[in-house]
Image (tube, grey):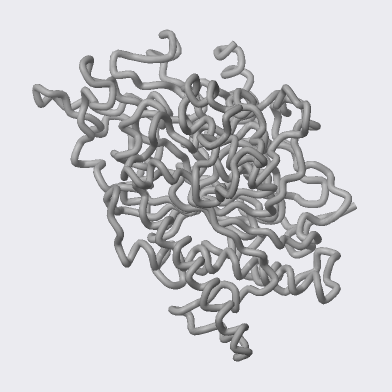
């Protein structure tokens, strides 16, 4: 039976101050919202789902049997270390949103590096890994089989976020199964990595007419990177529905118009990705400063429940850098994205080398480094609010839209919160401005104190992406398991009560 690294088996300090209070408060809607049907005149939505009730999983916190840390739910018992398996196949994705140019530049750079690497080998000159500012990923990380994907080529050509709907919301089982499996024999020489190929498939003509463009492209991508679900599976609630994907890690590169800095977005419960995120976070903060890099964790432990593109791989990792305008290339944003990307590839490569050298029992110098960097194995992060509405990866404070244009907000984000991503917002603080100049304060619908994320994100003006401002609370996760940590007996008992009350309210 695998146990997390022994250095982590220690009781970490209790969570003090407002962080615990904001965690608990955020699980409860305000009285006004609890009495309503789930929205107010402002369109503000409470976090209608309880923190610990996800997909019918345990509603109580649980102690890791190999540690004194308390997790939001019991980490599954594993026969082998999640770090014992080499991770070879990696796909770097750009252009999931067609007008986010940084990711497209990065994958084009990788393909140029591939070409240069092949030329060096052909000339028998060998390879040189380069310096920190001039990395050739094929020379620096030879244990990895690195591929690239231009996710939405049509939207990219038109400089649009999407053609019909947000591609990064189309990878749930329900949506994927609307499209028949891609018949590559009908696509000719079309390359799914860079082209939309189903328009060449005569058998897909009816599907192309009846469904959004991104629904069909999502199925193409899933066939290339996945499969995400086992053949014949019809329900994502069954653990057996999850399939063994062709790709070990899918790295999706995004930009944001908001002041999010370098944001590492990962799912809860994936130990390998949690450790990788901890490693990348440390590298980025060492180069750019602590305030410039954050880890955002979505409370979606089951891969089959996730609707984003990176869920097609066995592991998914999203890198999001801002601020930068849509449809614009900025050198600094590209450099920050590549810093995070190279740190992630470095982590995977170094662990592969350790496994190849016989360290397949979980022992690892790179994991020992993490134990030294993060005492007790605990990594600071922000925990996103659970998604409530269709089109959301996480919960938001939504705004009402103009009656004549569903993509134009009827309220404006107040200047005091603009560009203050990850800053705390408290009850009574200014939040929105009406046309007549009236200031609308935050009413506590998501807790007494929360942290705003993706403040006034341009992509969130679209209904299919989920309109509004993202909400999160400060939290911590255990990098050896990937699970959130609840840090005191009092927090555990109060949180249990909150969950039960919220469950009754939600049902």
Percent position of residue 154, x then y: 41, 42
The answer to which of 253 and 282 lies nearer the viewer is 253
Quadrant for residue 13, please give it: bottom right
In the picture, which quadrant includes the C terminus?
A: top right
The vertical placement of 260 against 227, above or below, is below
Percent position of residue 5, x then y: 77, 62
The vertical placement of 256 against 8, above or below, is above
Residue at 66 percent across and 72 percent down: it is: 369
Q: Is residue 494 visible?
A: no
Percent position of residue 255, x then y: 38, 51
Residue at 59 percent across and 73 percent down: it is: 138
Quadrant for residue 173, please give it: top right
Percent position of residue 355, x then y: 80, 69
Residue at 70 percent across and 40 percent down: it is: 227
The vertical placement of 416 against 368, above or below, is above
The answer to which of 506 and 179 lies nearer the viewer is 179
């Amino acid at each position: 039976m695998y146990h997390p690294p022994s250095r982590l088996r220690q009781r970490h300090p209790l969570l003090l101050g407002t962080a615990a209070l904001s965690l608990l408060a955020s699980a409860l809607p305000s009285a006004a919202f609890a009495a309503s049907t789930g929205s107010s005149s402002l369109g503000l939505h409470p976090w209608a789902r309880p923190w610990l009730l996800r997909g019918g999983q345990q509603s109580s916190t649980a102690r890791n049997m190999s540690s004194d840390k308390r997790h939001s739910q019991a980490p599954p018992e594993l026969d082998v270390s999640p770090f014992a398996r080499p991770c070879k196949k990696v796909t770097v994705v750009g252009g999931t949103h067609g007008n986010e140019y940084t990711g497209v530049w990065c994958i084009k750079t990788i393909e140029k590096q591939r070409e240069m690497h092949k030329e060096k080998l052909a000339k028998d000159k060998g390879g040189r890994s380069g310096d920190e500012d001039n990395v050739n990923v094929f020379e620096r990380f030879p244990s990895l089989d690195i591929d690239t994907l231009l996710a939405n080529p049509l939207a990219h050509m038109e400089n649009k976020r999407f053609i019909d709907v947000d591609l990064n919301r189309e990878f749930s089982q329900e949506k994927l199964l609307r499209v028949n499996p891609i018949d590559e024999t009908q696509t000719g020489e079309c390359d799914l990595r860079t082209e939309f190929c189903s328009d060449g498939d005569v058998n897909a003509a009816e599907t192309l007419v009846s469904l959004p463009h991104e629904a069909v492209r999502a199925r193409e991508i899933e066939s290339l990177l996945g499969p995400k679900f086992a053949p014949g599976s019809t329900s994502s609630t069954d653990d057996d529905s999850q399939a063994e994907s062709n790709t070990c890690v899918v790295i999706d590169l995004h930009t944001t118009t908001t002041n999010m800095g370098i944001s590492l977005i990962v799912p809860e419960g994936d130990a390998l990705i949690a450790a990788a995120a901890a490693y990348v976070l440390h590298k980025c903060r060492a180069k750019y400063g602590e305030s410039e890099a954050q880890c955002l964790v979505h409370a979606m432990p089951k891969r089959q429940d996730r609707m984003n593109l990176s869920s097609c791989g066995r592991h998914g990792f999203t890198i999001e850098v801002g601020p930068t305008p849509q449809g614009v290339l900025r050198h600094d944003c590209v450099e920050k994205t590549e810093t995070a990307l190279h740190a992630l590839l470095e982590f995977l490569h170094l662990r592969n080398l350790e496994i190849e050298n016989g360290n397949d029992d979980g022992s690892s110098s790179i994991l020992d480094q993490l134990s030294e960097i993060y005492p007790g194995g605990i990594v600071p992060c922000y925990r996103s609010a659970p998604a409530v509405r269709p089109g959301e990866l996480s919960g938001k404070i939504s705004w009402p839209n103009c009656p004549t244009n569903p993509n134009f907000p009827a309220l404006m984000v107040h200047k005091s919160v603009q560009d203050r991503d990850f800053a705390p917002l408290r009850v009574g603080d200014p939040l929105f401005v009406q046309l007549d100049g009236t200031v609308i304060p935050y009413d506590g619908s998501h807790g007494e104190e929360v942290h705003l994320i993706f403040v006034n994100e341009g992509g969130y003006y679209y209904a299919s992406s989920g309109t509004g401002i993202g909400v999160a609370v400060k939290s911590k996760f255990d990098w050896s398991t990937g699970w959130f940590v609840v840090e005191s007996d009092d927090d555990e008992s109060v949180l249990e009560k909150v969950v039960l009350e919220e469950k009754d309210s939600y049902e």
